[in-house]
Each structure stands twice: as structure tokens, then as C-alpha cells.
Image (tube, coloured by chain):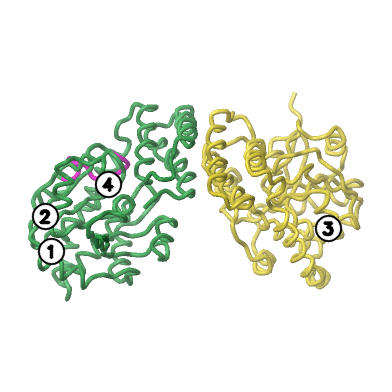
Chain colours: A green, B yellow
Amino acid sequence: MKLYLDCIPCFMQQALRAGRMATSDEKKIKLILDKTGEMVSTISMHATPAEIGMKVYRIVSEVTGVRDPYKHIKQQHISETKAIYPELEKIVADSVDKLLTAIRIAIAGNVIDLGVKKSFNIVKDVKYILKQEFAVFDYNAFKSHLQKAESILFIGDNAGESVFDKILIKELRKPVKYAVRSIPIINDVTMEDAIASGLDEVAELFDSGCKSPGIILNQSTPEFLEIFNSSDLVISKGQGNFEGLSDCNRQVFFLLKTKCPIISKHLGVEDGSIILKEHEFSETI
Amino acid sequence: MKLYLDCIPCFMQQALRAGRMATSDEKKIKLILDKTGEMVSTISMHATPAEIGMKVYRIVSEVTGVRDPYKHIKQQHISETKAIYPELEKIVADSVDKLLTAIRIAIAGNVIDLGVKKSFNIVKDVKYILKQEFAVFDYNAFKSHLQKAESILFIGDNAGESVFDKILIKELRKPVKYAVRSIPIINDVTMEDAIASGLDEVAELFDSGCKSPGIILNQSTPEFLEIFNSSDLVISKGQGNFEGLSDCNRQVFFLLKTKCPIISKHLGVEDGSIILKEHEFSETI
């Protein structure tokens, strides 16, 4: 997905929000906004939002000297979601369609997104999403591909959400490789966060090489690209990864909750929709 | 009211919105955002939002060559509000407290604000505001000052809203001078709009000298300042004028609906509140 003009004011908003996470010094936050403003004229409309997002959060780190402004809140989210983990496992165990319930829970975890949303209530959101209608529901295709798959790539999104991904990965009952961000970026899941979430118990964790809030294929490691191209099934979580992979040259299943009006419009759904979307790719001559 | 950091992303949003009103050429709109971004580092946190707003809309005019992007929509709003004018007059005539009803209607007109809001439904909003509780309600002070006043300055805000101001001005039953913006800025009321609204039938119209979406005293004409200082009563409509006058050195009555979370916070009220506020000024030694 390419950048929309609407993304540009949103980058300023994100710069302000991340600046406030990193410091209470208003002069430094103003400097972050100044530098983000200066950066606007260098933005190509052919870039993806994640590429620009990366630049914004780099400015925040440079100005404040804080490498990981979201560190404590990520730890808090992981701890909070781990506390409700047994209850979520029970919900899956008691459900008629365990796989679908686990998918819903993994999507519910996607509300833990500090790039676009200021507040959320995870318990309330889980309960709602367990009953919410999907706006895009390629579940039959997903089940069919899962059945045949011998290797699965799961591209993680946010920390905290990663605990919910564990539920789904267990339910997939196949070997899973779980890709994390290379450095702390917003509240996205890093290797450290994935281990703290207990994901190492159910998947093989590896570093995607990406330093952006969403996968950018040409900035990923050769290892990531090899796994991305060769896996039988690719599951991509969240908006940031969707932005980076929505035009990619292979089949991908996107799992996300839409929280940005531009992405919702791009997908042709209402804001706040839950999505299980098959991205099909067929080579043309 | 001084600038808040939150105003800066909002300027980018306003630049985008006004750019889209002026042109459908995406490259020009991107250039507007580039120039607005570059301008951020020149913003002093001691400026008022209206001063920066003026710069943003100047960029839009310079890039697109369109001096008045909101011209047609202003004409449409004036025409729509004039169509319901007789009905509003009847509501006032049939009410127990005619002055208060006219104040409510004048505030209802304040929803016609294209600087901060994308959509509104004027008939629905009027009906709602006629019953809405005031969050700040200095009505007794207002009545008392009105009774003694022999000269009133009324500072207009948006076109369309100006038609509703006519209802209130008639109900004030005192000589009123009505100040308009010096040039088209967003959908604010200019001399041409005020005449189209029929305000010349009930007030003496004059140019404030201001080219910003809100009064800036040191950019107003000597005539405006003389009237501002000497009038027995000053009524200021809307958020833009509130921003410019909230720290001024004379008594003012502010009539507005809060549509911006920062102004609501500044006033200590919920967003969407209706306000009749006396700004008191007592000289200290």
C-alpha cells in the first residue's frame, strides 16, 4: 500500500505522541515536530507508510536520546495479556470452532497498537471481537491452505498482541517461524518482547531485519526473504505489515483490525472492522 | 490563548483539507504539505493559533493560485441558513426567554466551521443546541451588561453562522457594530458574506483588518481597536476569536461551541460544549 496524503498529518500526530512518550520536555517535543515537518518535503508518495514511520521514530530517538520510548508500556502490556492468557485458552478450548476462536483472539490482540490509537481496553475488546462479524472473511481458503501447509511464517506486529498470537500458533498445530522487528519501534514486538511473551515455547523466533513499524521487503534480511518466499503459508498481523505486503508477489493471509480510516477505505470496509483476508498473487505473462 | 503542541499536527490537517478545497491536483496538495511542514520550525509557541492558521491558508493560496477556496461553500451555507431563517425567527418569537433562545441559535450557527469540522447538519444541530445545557453560562452578567450598554461590538466568525448572528443582533435591541475579516480565510465571514447574510439591515458592518481565522489585536486596524476599547459590550463569536481574545485587557463575552479538544481542555469543559463566558479583566497595580 502506497502512502496517501492523509498519512502526512498523521505522521506529525505520531511524532507528537511518541515525543511525549519519550520526554516531558516541551522544547524537545517541539524540535521533534520541527524535524518531522522538515522531513515532509523529502517524502516520496511512492514510499510505504512504514518507511516514513521509521524516519519519524528515528527523529524521536535522536532528539530525546531515548531509544525505546515504549519499553515500559510494552512490558506492561505483555504482563497484562499474560495474566488473561489462561482465560483465553479456556475460551478456545470451550469453543465449537477452536481455530476460528483463536483467530478472533489474535485479531483482538491487534487493538494494542500505540501507533494509531491512544487508548483501548483489552478485556472489553476481546469480548467484543469474539462476537464481531468479519468484514473480510476468507476463512475457508485459510483452512484449506493451513491443512496442506508444512511450513508457516507468522509476521508479528505489536508486543502484548504477541501473547495472543501464541494462542493462535498453538491452534495452527504446524511448525511456525515467527518474525519480529529488528529494533524497538513504537510498541512493535522485538525478540526480547517475543521471548517475554512466551512465543519461544510455540514457534521458532527470528529477526526480520526490519526497523520499521511494518515489514518492508527490500529492507529485510536474506533469511527473512528466503523464509517469506518458501513458506507454504504466510500469516501477516496488523496494519503496518499489511501496508508493506498488500502488493507483494506471493499469497499472504492478513489478520488485522482496521484502526486507520485510510486503510479501512483502501480495504473498502468500515473503520474498526476485523479482517481475515487472502492476498492472492497470480503471475501474469 | 497560546499555541499548544497539539495544534501543530492540526495545522497539517487543515493544510490538507484546505488544499483539497482549492485543487484536486495531488502534487500541488503535497507541495502545500511540504511548505506547511517547512514552516513548523518557524512557529513560536508564543504565537496564537490564528496567526499560524493565517500562514497555512496563505500557503494554500500561493501554491494553488486560489484566493478563496471556500467561496462556493460559503455561498451555499449562507443560502441554506437564510432558507431556515424565518423558522428560527419564529422559534425566538414563540419562546419564553427570547434573548436566551437567540443566543442559543447564534451558538448553533457556530457549528458551521470548516477549519475544524468536516461535516455538520445545521437543522439537527440547531434543534440539539436549543435544548443543550451550557457548560459555561454567564447569562446574568450578560443581561446586566447588555441592559446598560449603549454601544456593542459583535465580532463575527463564520459565513452562514452570520445569518444566525442576525437573529441575536435583532434581539439585543441596541446599536451594534459587526466586525468582519479583511480577506477570505477558511469560511470566515467577510464584508461580502455579511452583506449576503443581510447583516447590514441590523448592524453597522466594518472591516477588522484581520486576515487570520480569529482576531489578532496587533494586526487589527486602528478603527477596530478604537471600537474594541470603547464599546460598552463586546461579543466574540467562535473559537478563532476566543483564541485571540482570551487573554485580552478588557471585558468580553464569548459565545461559542467547542469543537477542538485543546480549546475544550483550556476551558475545562467537554468537547462539543456550548459556552456563554464572561472574560473579566481587572487592572492590577
Q: Chain of mark 1?
A: A
Q: Is residue A79 left or right of residue B132?
A: left
Q: Which residues are magenta?
A: A185-194
Residue B178 placement (x, y as % from top left) = 84, 48
Q: Disc number at residue A228?
A: none
**Membership of A163 in magenta stretch:** no
Q: Residue at x 11, y 60 (%)?
A: A170
Residue at numbered disc 2: A176
Q: Disc number at residue A171?
A: 1
Residue B162 placement (x, y as % from top left) = 78, 56
- Where disc 1 sits, the SS reads helix
Q: Residue at x 24, y 60 (%)?
A: A283
Q: CA distance from mark 3 to mark 1?
A: 68 Å
> Foreground residue, A121 or B160?
B160
Establish whether labels 2 and 1 are both on one chain: yes
**Membership of A191 in magenta stretch:** yes
From where the camera sits, is residue B49 visible?
Answer: no
> Foreground residue, B57 or B284?
B57
Q: Residue at x 40, y 66 (%)?
A: A269
Q: CA distance from mark 3 to mark 2?
A: 69 Å
Residue at numbered disc 3: B196
Residue contact at pointers 1 and 4, CB within 8 angstroms? no
Q: Is residue B243 above or below residue B275?
A: above
The label nearer to you, 1 versus 4, is 4
Residue at numbered disc 4: A215
